Image: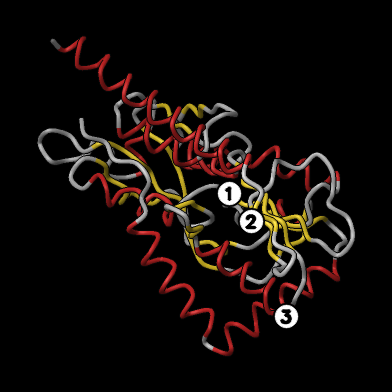
Amino acid sequence: MLKQASKTRHGNAGILIALLAVAIACMYALHRCSTSSPVQQPATAGTHHSGGDTLDIAIAYSPTFYYKRGDSLVGFHYELLHTIALRSKRPMKFHPIVTLASALQALNKGYYDLVAAEYPVTSENKARFLFTDPVMLDKQVLVQRVLPSGQVAIKSQLDLAGDTVWVVSGSPMADRVAGLSREIGDTIVVASDRQYGPEQLFLKVASGEVKYAVVNESIARALARSYRGKVDVGTAISFTQFQCWVLRAGNRSLQAFFNSWLRRLKASGDYDRLRAGSMSTTMQAAPMQHNG
């Protein structure tokens, strides 16, 4: 019976991840380009720049960044960029991404102008890229299943000694977990796979396929609403960090453009209104539910 239940859980996880991949593929296939609007979305992954005044935006496919809910697109970062595009009349084309590493490579090659994804500002990252003003604050948290007793196995970072933690390939989470391993003076194995984004990792933990994952708190809490009593995201792995949009090194003019609009929207109160409305919608849009 236990083996059969385990197979069922793993099968459910595979189905959920496959459905997510199909959803993203469908988004890539849609082309809703309107001549009356500066916003074009969604588009295929970047293989060349659109040219002209159009800004190619790589944006993470996740509840807080960019997500398709019914016939609408939601996500605070998407709605903020969409507002900037409309008010500045600067054409933008959105390219949904799942993995950060490939998006950053495409940014450096000039396929994208900006990457909106979970990439904290650190001294090491500042040496490689330019960043906008902070868009929001976030931190990295541990995703783990709640035990039948109602408790969790990992109550503090020290409890991770000797365990394996999954992270998004190429993400700063890997560096953070490696740093944590040094801090506690014991080994924490970091595992990753290039095909998994934060949503997939959350689902793999929720289904019991993997024990632990580290993702950003904003994403983890949005997804955890559908798993009350089953998944815990309360253990912090990092301090609170600035979350900014990423630009190519040297692209000061575009940095100034986005910073100017972020400051305008914050000063007018539109930023707070967008955030409140978008986060409320996002919390209702946690995409997948685990019934096991």
Q: Quadrant of the C terminus?
A: top left
Of the residues shown, which amino acid type is indicated by label 2?
Ala
Pointer 2 residue: 116
- In the displayed structure, 80 sits above or below 21; it is below
Question: Cβ–Cβ below 8 Å for labels 2 and 1?
Answer: yes
Whether residue 187 appears in this view of the structure is no
Q: Are marks 3 and 1 in contact (CB under 8 Å)?
A: no
Q: CA distance from mark 2 to mark 1?
A: 6 Å
For the rendered model, the colour scheme is secondary structure
3 and 2 marks in contact (CB < 8 Å): no
Residue located farthest toward the front when viewing the structure as drawn: 35
Nearer to me, 49 or 175: 49
Position of 103 with respect to 243 (left or right) is right
Number of on-image labels: 3
Q: Amino acid at mark 1?
A: Ala
Q: Residue at x 48, y 80 (%)?
A: 272
Q: CA distance from mark 3 to mark 1?
A: 23 Å
Of 42 and 47, nearer the camera is 42
Percent from the top left, x then y, of residue 82?
62, 68
Quadrant for the N terminus in the image: top left
Q: Is residue 255 left or right of residue 61?
A: right
Q: Residue at x 86, y 65 (%)?
A: 53
Which residue has dot 1 on it? 60
**Mark earlier in primary sequence (2, 1):** 1
Quickly name the residue at label 3: 260
* Image location (x, y in percent) of residue 245: 66, 61
Determine the image quadrant of residue 16. top left
- Mark 3: few/some/many CA within 10 Å (<14, 14-19, 20+): few
- 73 to the left or right of 144: right
Which of the two residues, 45 or 253, is positioned nearer the viewer here? 45
Callout 3: SS: helix
Among the two numbered marks 3 and 2 on one chain, the one whose residue lies closer to the N terminus: 2
